[in-house]
Image (cartoon, rainbow, N blue to C red):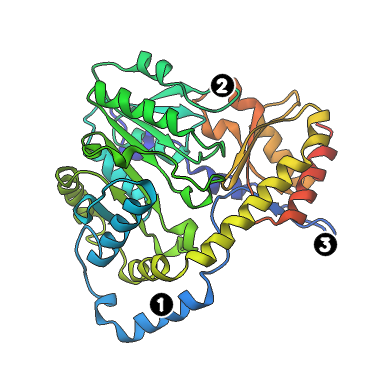
Amino acid sequence: MSLPRTATTFAPPVMEARRWLQGVTFPPGRPLLNVSQAAPVDPPPLAMREAMADLAMNEPQAHLYGPVLGLPALREEVAARWTRSYGGTVAAAQVAITSGCNQAFCAAIHTLVAEGDEVILPVPWYFNHKMWLDMAGAVAVPLPTGAGLIPDPEQAAALITPRTRAIVLVTPNNPGGVEYPPAVIRAFFDLARARSIALIVDETYRDFLAASSAPHDLFADPDWDDTLIQLYSFSKAYRLTGHRVGAMSASPARLAEVEKFLDTVTICPAQIGQFAALWGMQNLDQWLAGERDEIMARRAAITGGFAPLAAKGWELMGCGAYFAYMAHPFDLPSDRLAQRLVAEAGVLLLPGTMFMPEGDAAGKRQLRVAFANVDAQGIGALLDRLGGFAG
């Protein structure tokens, strides 16, 4: 008997990790350091919340159904911003607004795959991507990335079969934190186009790049939408996690297919969140630059303070955007280590086993730290606690 779709995949990893906290108490002098989830816990800035309150009171459209593909003004704003930022041309007709970036990925996949089709995912992978492929009846084909966590287009080419429909890149990467060089992204685009498959580039964390230059030049190609599907999230930029607002840039023909999916799932994205995202794009550039500077300072705190851990056999494999990805030196698998760290070090993080194919030996040595909600002082405490763990 075949399994129902939800039974084909694993339980949500973040929810599983939260269950490790049950029954554990943390002394006042050593409170829990929760570095398990990559989402801001602070509300949007005050000015945005005031704008949202005004919308709720005075904008009737904020409480009604809207267009399935999103608020026209927000689609236009995204298109104009991408045109400026990437040095190419993106039209509003090539942009859809979704209920979060995860939904954008799900919608894109449903325009691409049939039962048994394949999608190449670099590993360590973002677990929600793997979960959706499982539930969509597609096959996730792992692309190992090695010590530097940068995927190799030539290795990807060797994995392409007649059933391959897409390659997925996440940059800056979740969980690895690394930023893929523009030349690597271009090489994947050229490969995908040559093999007549899609390239999905998830840029959820693009606002927290270390470099100030464009992360790639794909939009400069006049025919970019014959291959590229770009995804974005407003959640991280403007702390709109609870409002679920994302975006997809793709061809109008693909968005017509996306519209079918979205109309049967949410009908339209939540209106207040869309108006808030538009307001943020128009008014919060300076504030967002400050948020990026703070993330860069936290990244520097990890890279600058890692030497004592390195001396004990730890390895910092990647660090950037919201994430640090580490290899531990202990003779126990990372899922067991992560659970022990809760009680013995007061640290909640995620094991590499949650980002790897089942049974992959590399995942048993790896850990992900999401530092978006831990300041430099907290990062220092985190590194001290990890360094003091005896295994």
Identify which residue is drawn at 25% across, 21% down. 194
Q: Quadrant of the C terminus?
A: top right
In primary-sequence order, the first of circles 3 and 2 is 3
In primary-sequence order, the first of circles 1 and 3 is 3
Question: Camera-side residue: 185 or 139?
Answer: 185
Q: Residues within 10 Å of mark 3 (few under 14, many from 20)?
A: few
Q: Is residue 157 left or right of residue 165?
A: right
Is residue 21 visible from the viewing direction of this image? no
Q: Residues within 10 Å of mark 1 (few under 14, many from 20)?
A: many
Q: Quadrant of the N terminus?
A: top left
Residue 129 % position (x, y): 40, 38
Indicate the secondary structure of the residue bearing disc 1. helix
Q: Do the residues bearing badges 2 and 1 touch, measured as CB atoms within 8 Å?
A: no
Q: CA distance from mark 3 to mark 2?
A: 40 Å
> As shown in the figure, which amino acid type bears the numbered disc 1?
Met
Q: CA distance from mark 1 to mark 3?
A: 37 Å
Residue 104 % position (x, y): 32, 48
Q: Quadrant of residue 210?
A: top right
Residue depth check, mark 3 versus mark 2: number of the one nearer the observer: 2
Identify which residue is drawn at 56% across, 21% down. 146
Q: Quadrant of residue 199?
A: top left
Residue 52, numbered circle: 1
Residue 146, numbered circle: 2
Residue 345 % position (x, y): 79, 45
Question: Camera-side residue: 315 or 18?
Answer: 315
Is residue 86 visible from the viewing direction of this image? yes
Above or below — where is 246 with respect to 227?
Answer: below
Q: Is residue 319 left or right of residue 204?
A: right
In primary-sequence order, the first of circles 2 and 1 is 1
Which residue has dot 3 on it? 28
